[in-house]
Image: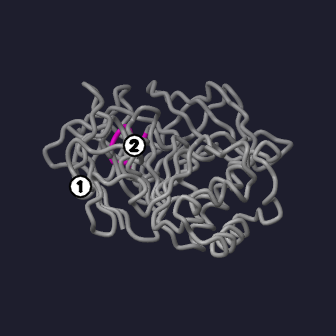
């Protein structure tokens, strides 16, 4: 459905998108994820036609549209601000694009009704935007985009203005709607949870480049770069020296002296140093040692209650500082306290090599 071939976009001396190539399949929900200023919105604007590439090409359905204006592309965009006309009713806002396309009145009215029904706003057709909640306005903007029947829907952080609970509900609604309609969605966000919840695939963008592309499970559990590991969720990133290789495993020594056994799958044969990533929830905490490839002792320096979980700040006997997450299974008893000495265990798959030298 979409093919981006070696696209570069500059604004003066600043390169916003740097030689990016990406293919998006028909009916796919793909998310461009990254921090502010990384180039994800510029990439979306290149797809929409609001910007033209300095190098490379943008193809829709195999046709090069790099220099075509937005109205000649079968795409529509939902903006962060919703961009609704305040003086128009919901029905008139949704039908605006159809009027610009000179769609016959009878057909337009039917399509407007269908679009409002799709986003559960059929009974709100005569309201003005200021009479609606943020979530309802977001749905109006979505209906306005859907009514023109685009092949691709572009969404630029459309949920960022909503409160946390409503935002979570809208994430699920958007995903269900995308599956129901079978449209191709390209979604831009800086919210990691949003990307993990909604996406078929995620492209992590950093400094105008794609750092990693994959499904949510791969992106979270097997990050390929330090940036990807640190940006998605939390990660303990630790520098290590490779001191021994044995078959499919290697022993690495952290700067503190703590030694860990890791899998060699992602470790080049010539590498002597590595950066390893350990997710906090992968550190298993206990009063007695568990059966695992890596077992070591640590002291709990701080315990932070977070509702369903406790965050523990640990320091190992060798001096390595780690963050761990443990589930709160009882409302009346905290399993671990500051000052406790505990056993930590890690399996081979719990330690991911994200960089090797």
Task: Quote the CA–CA distance across marks 2 and 1.
Answer: 23 Å
In the rendering, at what x and y percent does residue 89 appear? 75, 52
Between 130 and 154, the one nearer to me in the picture: 130
Read off the magenta span: 223-229
Between 154 and 314, the one nearer to me in the picture: 154
Compared to residue 304, the image places residue 110 above or below, namely below
Report the residue at 28% width, 53% height from top: 66
The quarter of the picture where residue 51 lies is top left
Q: Which residue is mark 1?
A: 5
Q: Which residue is mark 2?
A: 228
- Residue 88 horizontal side relative to residue 3, left or right: right
| Residue 69, visible in the rendered structure | yes
The secondary structure type at the circle numbered 2 is: helix
Compared to residue 307, the image places residue 201 above or below, namely below
Nearest-to-viewer mark from 2 and 1:
1
Report the residue at 66% width, 25% height from top: 339
| Residue 277, visible in the rendered structure | no
In the rendering, at what x and y percent does residue 137 appear? 71, 49
Check the picture and name the quadrant holding the N terminus. bottom left
Check the picture and name the quadrant holding the C terminus. top left
Between 9 and 264, the one nearer to me in the picture: 9
The quarter of the picture where residue 13 lies is top left
Between 120 and 339, the one nearer to me in the picture: 120
Magenta run includes residue 2? no
Question: How many C-alpha atoms fall within 10 Å of the one at disc 2: few (<14), some, or many (≥20)?
Answer: many
The secondary structure type at the circle numbered 1 is: strand
């Amino acid at each position: 459905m979409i093919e981006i071939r070696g696209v570069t976009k500059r604004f003066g001396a600043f390169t916003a998108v740097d030689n990016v190539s990406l293919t998006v399949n028909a009916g796919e929900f793909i998310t461009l994820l990254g921090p502010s200023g990384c180039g994800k919105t510029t990439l979306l604007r290149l797809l929409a036609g609001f910007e033209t590439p300095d190098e490379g090409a943008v193809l829709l359905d195999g046709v090069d549209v790099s220099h075509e204006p937005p109205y000649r592309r079968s795409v529509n965009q939902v903006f962060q601000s919703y961009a609704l006309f305040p003086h128009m009713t919901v029905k008139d806002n949704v039908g605006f694009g159809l009027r610009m396309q000179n769609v016959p009145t009878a057909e337009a009215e039917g399509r407007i009704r269908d679009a409002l029904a799709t986003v559960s706003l059929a009974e709100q057709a005569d309201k003005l935007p200021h009479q609606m909640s943020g979530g309802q306005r977001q749905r109006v903007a979505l209906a306005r985009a859907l009514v023109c029947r685009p092949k691709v829907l572009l969404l630029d952080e459309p949920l960022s203005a909503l409160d946390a609970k409503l935002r979570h509900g809208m994430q699920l609604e958007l995903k269900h709607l995308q599956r129901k309609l079978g449209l191709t969605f390209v979604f831009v966000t800086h919210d990691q949870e949003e990307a993990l919840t909604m996406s078929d695939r995620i492209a992590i963008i950093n400094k105008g480049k794609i750092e990693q592309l994959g499904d949510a499970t791969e992106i979270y559990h097997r990050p390929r770069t330090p940036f990807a590991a640190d940006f998605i969720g939390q990660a303990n990133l630790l520098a290590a020296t490779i001191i021994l290789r044995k078959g499919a495993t290697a022993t690495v020594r952290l700067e503190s002296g703590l030694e860990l056994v890791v899998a060699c799958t992602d470790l080049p044969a010539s590498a002597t140093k590595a950066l390893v990533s350990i997710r906090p929830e992968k550190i298993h905490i206990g009063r007695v040692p568990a059966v695992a490839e890596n077992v070591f002792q640590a002291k709990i320096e701080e315990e932070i209650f977070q509702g369903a979980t406790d965050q523990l700040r640990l320091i190992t006997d060798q001096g390595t500082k780690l963050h761990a997450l443990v589930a709160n299974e009882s409302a009346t008893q905290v399993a671990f306290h500051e000052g406790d000495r505990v056993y930590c265990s890690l399996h081979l798959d719990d330690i991911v090599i994200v960089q090797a030298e």
